[in-house]
Image (cartoon, rainbow, N blue to C red):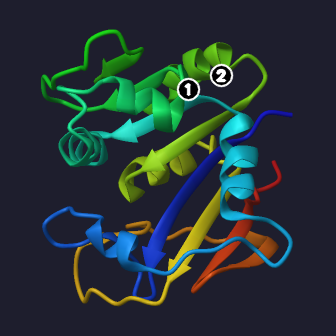
């Protein structure tokens, strides 16, 4: 069964970006594969199961700027392939030429149906931010939270999940260099 997964990295004190919405802190952390897998194998397995992506506008703008994607749209494909991406925003944002990036202003529920259809039986990846992942959770659409915890503290910034979420069940814990990757199942209320 295809899953909707929030997969991200966080600091030890629970921030996914610093106060300037930057992820530079993440690139300074020593990474490595688990004891049994190389880091590329872990990434390849995850991204290979993804058929569609959801992204908040702040994350999207950071990726555009950090990777220079307006000038070099081919870089997007190096990271994400030809998977369609939905960017949730209330603003008009630039879209690199030739990429399947859709700007949407809708609630996550109707867009999720379209994303699942486009994913064609593969997973939907909620890249970020935390509020967007929370919206998927609030709508009962989030199946897993996968978070790599880095040995970094920022003191402030964009929170991992800026709302209360309970009933998570730990499925896996993997050492990844100096990080720990935790996979949680999002358990829904019976009813």
Work out how far the residue at label 2 is from the one at label 1, CA to CA, in angstroms. Answer: 6 Å
Q: Residue at x 64, y 62 (%)?
A: 146
Residue 169 placement: quadrant: bottom right
Q: Residue at x 25, y 27 (%)?
A: 72
Q: Say which residue label 2 marks.
A: 116
Q: Secondary structure at mark 2?
A: helix
Q: Residue at x 72, y 67 (%)?
A: 183
Q: Nearer the viewer, residue 35 or 104?
A: 35
Residue 136 in the figure: left or right of residue 182: left
Locate the N terminus by quadrant.
top right
Label 1: how many residues lie within 10 Å, few (<14), some (14-19) or many (20+)? many
Q: Secondary structure at mark 1?
A: helix
Where is residue 186 shown, x and y percent of the image?
71, 59
Q: Nearer the viewer, residue 63 or 164?
A: 63
Q: Is residue 84 above or below residue 122?
A: above
Figure disc tally: 2
Q: Is residue 167 visible?
A: no
Where is residue 121 shown, x and y percent of the image?
79, 22
Residue 168 in the figure: left or right of residue 104: right
Residue 125 placement: quadrant: top right
Q: Is residue 130 visible?
A: yes
Q: Nearer the viewer, residue 28 or 112?
A: 28
Q: Say which residue label 1 marks.
A: 112
Circle on res. 172:
none
Residue 65 in the figure: left or right of residue 133: left
Q: Residue at x 51, y 33 (%)?
A: 80
Where is residue 116 shown, x and y percent of the image?
65, 22
Which residue of the protein is positioned furthest toward the top in this rendering?
98
Where is residue 128 shown, x and y percent of the image?
41, 50
Q: Is residue 136 above or below residue 7?
A: above
| Labels 2 and 1 touching (C-beta < 8 A) | yes
């Amino acid at each position: 069964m295809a899953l909707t997964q929030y997969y991200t990295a966080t600091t030890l004190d629970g921030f996914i970006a610093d106060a300037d919405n930057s992820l530079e802190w993440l690139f300074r952390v020593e990474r490595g594969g688990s004891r049994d897998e190389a880091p590329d194998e872990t990434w390849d397995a995850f991204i290979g199961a993804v058929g569609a992506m959801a992204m908040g506008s702040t994350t999207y703008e950071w990726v555009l700027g950090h990777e220079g994607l307006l000038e070099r749209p081919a870089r997007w494909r190096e990271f994400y392939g030809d998977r369609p991406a939905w960017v949730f925003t209330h603003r008009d944002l630039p879209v690199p030429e030739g990429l399947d990036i859709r700007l949407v202003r809708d609630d996550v529920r109707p867009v999720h149906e379209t994303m699942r259809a486009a994913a064609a039986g593969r997973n939907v990846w909620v890249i970020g931010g935390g509020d967007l992942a929370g919206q998927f959770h609030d709508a009962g659409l989030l199946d897993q939270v996968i978070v790599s915890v880095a040995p970094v503290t920022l003191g402030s910034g964009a929170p991992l999940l800026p709302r209360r979420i309970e009933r998570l069940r730990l499925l896996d814990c993997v050492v990844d260099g100096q990080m720990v990757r935790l996979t949680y199942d999002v358990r829904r209320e019976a009813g």
